[in-house]
Image: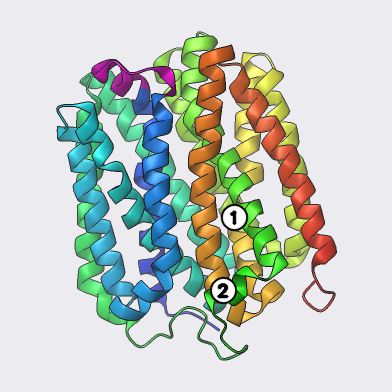
Amino acid sequence: MNPRPLLLAIAYLAFISLGLPDAVLGVAWPSVRETFSLPLSGLGMVLVGTGTGYFLSGLVAGRLVQALGVGTLLTVSSALVALSLFGYSLAPMWPLFLLCTPFIGLGSGAIDSGINAYAASHFPVRHVNWLHACYGFGAMLGPLVMTAMLVRSGSWRWGYAIIGAMLLLMALTFGATRASWKTEGTPGADGSDAPTSASQALRHPMVWLQIVIFFVYTGLEVTAGQWCFTLYTQARAVPAELAGTWTGLYWGSLAVGRVFMGFVVERLGPDRLLRFSILSAVAGSALFAFGPTLASLGGLLLIGMSLAPIYPTLMSRTPGRLGAGYAAHAVGFQVSAAMLGAAALPSLAGVLAARFGLGLVGWVTVVAAALLCLLHETLLKLTPRSAA
């Protein structure tokens, strides 16, 4: 199926909006922590709040799409994220800052689940990779905006205000184009498999295996991205401007990798590409954790390039592995599990870093990458030959 250009353009815009706020926290956190006099592990409270909203949103995403339509869902969700970012920039005290976190998760999760479910069933795998490349471009832009504001004005509040304004403009764009989604089918409604209930999907062992894989994968991605700035500036004496640039490059490598992998995934085969990428992520994590500063920076970029095709390719493979009936629910569960991982593993890294030193952040990435490799090999063995 060849998707309509306007529909693809809206989807790309949605993924850019998803990426903009997600990677900013790692750059802003040292300044936010200083403003509110917080412990190092306080980052986990923000991640848990955001992850909880994301998790809940993923569970009900299918119902929201059916009730509102994709276009309206994008409009409302983007506006919710924008208003919450403005709340960050204006919060006079820590509890009010923290209060905004679940609303960012709710809005971002609704965008993520709805479009992923649609794209997995209606877009070729190369387009799914390119959609997630747009997320990477947004995630690269966010830290660069925040770093520029920190360097020029010394205020993290201006960084969040500017990103909030960008999200608000995107919400207006979605509102103006929401009717273009009305003639398209809802996620998973392609008639290839009989529909199933959520409880039936949760009794499928491969659904649970993919839930765990998405939990570990996103935990690895976010741990490296959110903690690398603090690790380099506070443990390895890297200047803040340089560390912020490398943080942006990490998220940018996810985008560049997804663009490139979109051209090769159908020639190499998705499962073979996934295996190669995960093994490369293990090597990059080892360099990031144990290499000298220059090698560690290279390892950080290798992690980003290696992780680039994993999330979109796994998501695109879901209907083929499970059937469209299960995939409609599984995609939402996978998005929810991914955000739990994005909250849990970086939070664990923060607790370990506060107790044993920032060097433990690298250990967390190595263990997560090795576990991801083991889980994916198990998934390959359980995949039926017809789906492989």
Where is 88 relative to 94, above or below?
below
Give x and y (percent) for residue 20: 36, 45
Give x and y (percent) for residue 116: 49, 66
User: Which quarter shows the C terminus?
Assistant: bottom right
Give x and y (percent) for residue 194: 60, 89
Where is 234 relative to 165, above or below?
above
Report the residue at 60% width, 63% height from top: 315
Local SS, label 1 = helix
The reply to whether callout 1 and callout 2 are in contact (CB within 8 Å) is no
Q: Residues within 10 Å of mark 1 (few under 14, many from 20)?
A: many
Local SS, label 2 = helix
Name the residue that disc number 2 marks. Answer: 199
Side (left or right) of 75 relative to 375? left
Query: What's drawn in magenta, residue-wise?
Result: 30-41
Where is 17 relative to 92, above or below?
below
Side (left or right) of 40 relative to 219? left
Q: Say what amino acid the circle numbered 1 marks.
A: Tyr
User: Which quarter shows the N terminus?
Assistant: bottom right
Is residue 133 within the magenta segment? no
How many numbered marks are there?
2
Q: Main secondary structure of the magenta part?
A: helix
Name the residue that disc number 1 marks. Answer: 311
Can you see residue 84? yes
Can you see residue 138? no
Side (left or right) of 208 relative to 331? right
Q: Residues within 10 Å of mark 2 (few under 14, many from 20)?
A: few
